[in-house]
Amino acid sequence: MIIETHAHLDFPEYKNDLDAVMARAKESGIATIINVSSSLKGCFASVDLSRRYDSIYAALGIHPHDAKEVDNACLDKIRELVASSKKIVAIGEVGLDFYRNLSPKETQHSAFVKFLKLSKELNLPLILHCREETPESREAQDMLFKAMEENLELPFKGVMHCFSGDEKLLRRCLDSGLHISFTCNVTFKKADRLREVLKRTPIDKLLLETDSPFLAPQTERGKRNEPAYLRYLVDAIAEDNEMQKKDIEEITTQNARRLFGI
């Protein structure tokens, strides 16, 4: 059985066939799905999904695109949601996105710091989003790690989701205690560099995700992604690292259980 650590099943792409999506996930060996929020509305929707489906747990947070939403009233509502359910396992996704810059950098940073403090207050791990303006830039990661260093104690409890960085960022994450999560984009034909970084990721720090509905695997490119496609990621990791699929499934599942307390 596998744990899908990052999906957005509350998105409109699933409004017409979510039961079928969940059935396919179960058939593919997905035991648990963490539905990750990206807006305050999404936080409520994630909690609703966790109540509707036994296999769904929720992460609550605001994506940096919508950082302007994050005020004291927003944080109070998230606190109330956490208090209302035992199936909330993380704060996320939160972080910085300088690629699209849909919120000013200063606003993103301010919101991120608020969520760092909230994660510490609630003793919940972080699901982190970090995207640079250009592949060569390190501004977002530098700001992100500085904020964590100023507001949290090492080792940091969380995961760098949808990892797409280089070996330097990988080492920085690992040295700080973070887990690393890869998506089905490692199956893309031109993802050789990312596959090399994956090979250097210790198996005891590895998590699996689809980031559905985004980043469908190579064989399904152009389609909506869904948790059942996590099997393509497992196949790719097994082939590239000369490991048994069952070992990858068992180890990453235990990693997720330890981090998220599932």
Image (cartoon, rainbow, N blue to C red):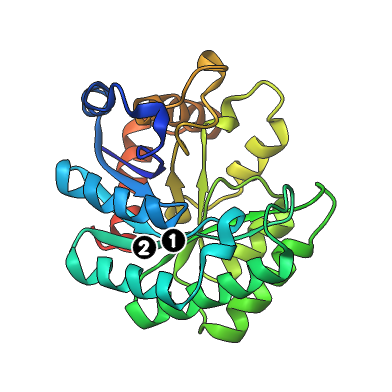
Q: Position of residue 12 (x, y in %)?
A: 40, 32
Q: Residue furthest top?
A: 219
Question: Which residue is at 52% across, 81% downward?
Answer: 154
Find disc 1 in the rendering and name its residue. Answer: 61
Q: Does 147 sit left or right of 14 as displayed?
A: right
Q: Quadrant of the C terminus?
A: bottom left
Question: Could you say whether the residue bearing mark 1 is in a helix, strand or loop?
Answer: loop
Q: Residues within 10 Å of mark 2 (few under 14, many from 20)?
A: many
Q: Position of residue 212 (x, y in %)?
A: 45, 34
Q: Residue furthest front?
A: 73
Compare residues 50 and 241 and report the one nearer the observer. Answer: 50
**What amino acid does circle 2 point to?**
Ala
Q: In the figure, 97 relative to 246: above or below?
A: below
Question: Which residue is at 46% across, 54% downward?
Answer: 39
Q: Position of residue 171 (x, y in %)?
A: 65, 61
Find disc 2 in the rendering and name its residue. Answer: 90
